[in-house]
Amino acid sequence: MISPNFPAVNKQTSRKPLISSLLSLLFMGLGQLYNRQFAKGLLMVIFEAYILIFWSSPIAKGIWGLVTLGEQVQVRSRGRIVEQGDHSIFLLVEGIIFLLALILLICFYIFSIGDAYKVRKGIEAGIPANDAKQSIKFAWERGYVYFLLAPAIIFTMFLTVLPLLFGILIAFTNYSGPNHLPPKHLVDWVGFKTFTNLFSLTNWSNTFFGVIKWTLLWAVLATATTYFTGLFYSLIINVKAIKFKKMWRTIYILPWAIPAFISILIFRNFFNAEFGPLNEYLGLIGIDKIPWLGDPFWAKVALVFVNTWLGFPFWLALMSGVLTNIDRDLYEAAEIDGASSWQRFQSITLPLVLFATAPLLIMSFAGNLNNFNIIYLFTEGGPVNMDYSFAGSTDILISWIFKLTLQQNQFNTASAVSILVFIIIAVFSIWNFRQTRAFKEEDMIQ
Amino acid sequence: MKTQPNSTTAAASKSPFGQLIKQKLLLFIIYAILIITAIAVLYPVIWIILGSFNPGDTINATTYLPESLTIKHYVNLFNTTNYLIWYKNTLFVAVMNMILSTVLVVSAAYAFSRFRFPGRKQGLMVMLVLQMFPSFMGMIAIYILLLQLNLLDNLWGLILVYAGGSIPFGTWLVKGYFDGLPRSLEEAAKIDGASHTTIFVRIMMPLSVPMFTFIAVNNFIGPWMDFIFARLVILSDRNKTLAIGLFEMITGRTNNDFTTFAAGAVLVAIPITLLFLMLQKYIIEGLKAGANKG
């Protein structure tokens, strides 16, 4: 944009934007002062000075902690703590916080440099810089969105991003019992050793592959049984001659409506081998007591059964909705063409139901991979498996991770397994996502 | 119902009588299946309700129909355990989490849906990736963080953890819903000089009642069910939520508390179940939307 009033100025001072951004690079706010935005520039100068004076040494210490994870081992003599020593895990968490803060600061710094450059460029082109009042108004308009986002960002930063970063980093340390637990001991970075151990040490790899196999089998079984049971009941309730459709649907939705942890705990007692009613009933018809929760095979059968009980109502409700929305004309047309009822089912009902439920099917599969509640509340991963390290026969990856973390202090292995679980889930989700194309459509709404 | 691919269209049959018998038989089988399933579905419910009124204390006493009914387990529940306190705790956490999560999720979703700003695409991507991590991967860090903030064994600590966890998925869900709302109304309001806040309160909110209901209900019900984080954050008996309290009642070696557990379970299940049944329409719609929007 050429402003006819100041052609000469324009030519002479083409290096000024660069100067103002260099000044800002030197010290935050200098560029703004140079641009005669005094209030803004002064605030920035004060801000950087404040950070430098009060925060540079904590930040430096935080980064030091992150890199070294502490150097001073706790010293004890005769059971008393002589020297407190460094707590590696606290240092790690603090280090991440300071690292995140530093990144935010750097972003702000870069923004200030860019701002100085842009404002100067504007001045050169004849647009006067905003004064303080205008700046505030402008910031409020442009910043409204950040004002909306700020709470969510802060929450996500501290309660999701920070813990996850920590969780990921733990996989590359030796943070585990009994020899590397702070505050008694220090923790060190060990690179990929945890991962290689997971695959090469037999006690770990046995457990890992065994648990993975059951996890995948479980996810497939759990998804398939609930899905097809739901489909079956939605179809038979939908048969025209069946009466009280609403009543059946209401009864069948109960298992979904009742809090799952209560149902699971009830079933845990129902399947109790000694006192549970199921074995009692089986006894009445002459079947010996089955060790439901004491035998790996029967425990798995019971799990799948309970999960079907809990899960089919969801599909039933969903598919009933789909079925009532299918256009009746389709069936009439098919009938005129002489299609048998099986053919009509196969080529109209089934594809439409599958199409409508496919995205949820994938989501449900991913959910079952991580279905911690049912495993932990129903069997607690049991029965005991002698070949496994810290896992029982019905443990899936996620419940194994839970045990490794909260009960066995094997934090590094737990975290390595979590990363692998994440990779599996991420592959599924991304695939699902590309199918639904939500992200591509996303930009069409502009 | 409109569709019935399996039966009842007897039009093209050879012998009408044989067809009729076949149909009756089929119907009979279907009803039999429906009734048996209904029993299977209702059995645990009835068992636990009867159990809670049964004079005995252990599971085997509750196996058969009781001869007399008693409310002593309910009395027990209130006199010998902290059940009432757990109930209050859970209700408090649930309500607070519902309010906090809904505010956080809706404001973030509104920003992502209606504003274009630097970092928007990256922000959405980050949210998408975050919800794929197993939720308790960050458990240790959350524990340390709450310890430092003095929020361990504190209900507010638990509320913060739940609210933080609900953001990534919820934001995507609500953003998707907002994207689907027409913009013409807002634009008209903007021309009339309405502020962002006014537009949001007057136009977006009334249009989004179903989605708001889903988010609110989800976050209200969540704390009643959650076991993992409550176990992590809560240490003392006074601060327990119902899920932990009831779990511990029943996982002891003796199983002596079974009937007390039954009474406690009934009192939790009734309100939650009713709430769910009343709002199931929204819940199903919300889940469908969630699957389609990633």
Image (cartoon, coloured by chain):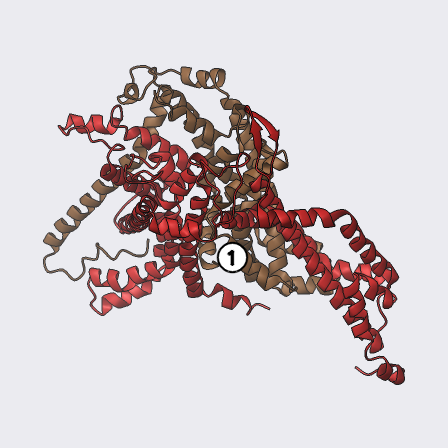
Q: Is any atom of residue B199 visible in this view?
A: no
What color does chain A have in the rendering? red
The image shows residue B266 at horizontal and vertical percentages of 41, 27
For label 1, the SS is helix
Residue at position x 26%, y 21% from top?
B64
Please name whichever residue, B8 or B202, is drawn nearer the observer in this view of the structure: B202
The quarter of the picture where the C terminus of chain A appears is: bottom right
Question: Which x, y percent locates residue A437?
Answer: 46, 66
Q: Is residue A352 visible?
A: yes
Label 1 sits on residue: B128
| Residue A327 % position (x, y) | 35, 62
Between A300 and A440, the one lying in front of the other is A300
Q: Relative to residue A318, is residue A34 drawn left or right? A: right
Q: Which chain is mark 1 on?
A: B
Q: Nearer the viewer, residue A205 or A375?
A: A205
In the image, is A40 to the left or to the right of B22? right
Q: Residues within 10 Å of mark 1 (few under 14, many from 20)?
A: many
Q: Residue at x 34, y 23 (%)?
A: B50
Name the amino acid, label 1. Leu
* Chain in brown in the render: B
Q: Residue at x 57, y 67 (%)?
A: A445
Q: Where B234 sits versus A27, above or below?
A: above
Count of marks, rendered view: 1
Q: Determine whether B149 is above or below A97 in the image.
A: above
Query: Residue A373 in the image: x percent, y percent?
Result: 40, 39
